[in-house]
Amino acid sequence: MKTYGGARPILAPSILAADFTCLGDQIQAVSGAGAPYLHIDVMDGIFVPSISFGMPLIGSIRKCTDMIFDVHLMIEEPWRHVDKFVECGADILTFHVESIRHPTHVQQTIEHIHHLGIRAGLAIKPATPMEILLPYLNELDQILVMTVEPGFGGQQYIDACTDKIRQTRSMLEEHGLSTDIQIDGGVTQDNIRIPVEAGASVIVAGSAVFRGDPAANVRTLVDAMNGNQR
Ligand code: DX5
Ligand code: ZN
């Protein structure tokens, strides 16, 4: 039985910044240091300029860990690939509201993900107003508020997005929902409290985890996230 979300914020290391020559070891390191989610960025070179990786890599690392696979789809027409991502081991599939033109398809994609027995999330870019999520609010397990432009790791946290996190939390509270709010991009040990205090419950960090010693970085980030001094 996997545990998602919860009272305390969760750290989700993003393997985009990992050393792929020893990916299995890096995953063991972040898992051993207590990170429950593994954030997996899938990019198609169309929705975003870069191409990252896809099902073969996910299927392969599925064999070496029980971590929750939190798959962030930065791809056009995500519905085409939902079955394959579930087959290769995704536990949460989050796609971008901007990647689908027709609102009915957004709804159908969420339903399809749920039908396959995993959690569904919707992501929004920094410039997209979060009101666009209103029609889907009741169906979502997770909302991903991007705190950088999607497409690359190692960018700087966009301060203006903090307000958006607050607004998303208020919007959810108004609807009596405790949906997870995930944030992604530019997190460091110095700024990690900012999104948490604004209401985020799942914090993605790529460079801040994998540059240097991943296990030590996870422990430092988790402490900082929970407001503990080291
Ligand atoms: C960016 C990706 C992020 C990225 C974050 O499009 O969605 O998950 O890996 O990297 P950092 O933490 O380095 O900003
Ligand atoms: Zn991501």
Image: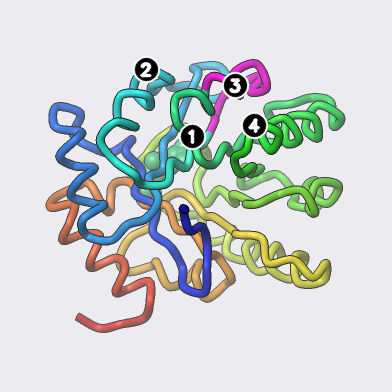
Say if 77 sits above or below 146 in the image: above
Q: Amino acid at mark 4?
A: Leu
User: Which mark is drawn over residue 90?
Assistant: 1
Bounds of the magenta span? Answer: 73-84
Q: Amino acid at mark 1?
A: Ala
Could you say which is closer to the camera, residue 65 or residue 95?
Answer: 65
Q: Where does the image place residue 77, in percent across and percent down from the top left?
A: 67, 19
Q: Is residue 77 left or right of 84 when viewed as pictured?
A: right
Q: Return the disc, 1 or 4, that comes first in the chain's sequence.
A: 1
Distance from Cα at disc 3 to Cα at disc 1 = 10 Å
Q: Which residue is mark 3?
A: 83
Asked if marks 4 and 3 touch (Cβ < 8 Å), the reply is yes
Asked if marks 1 and 4 touch (Cβ < 8 Å), the reply is no
Q: Which residue is mark 4?
A: 116
Distance from Cα at disc 4 to Cα at disc 3 = 8 Å
Q: Is residue 168 magenta?
A: no
Instruction: Name the residue: 79% across, 70% down.
Output: 176
Q: Amino acid at mark 2?
A: Pro
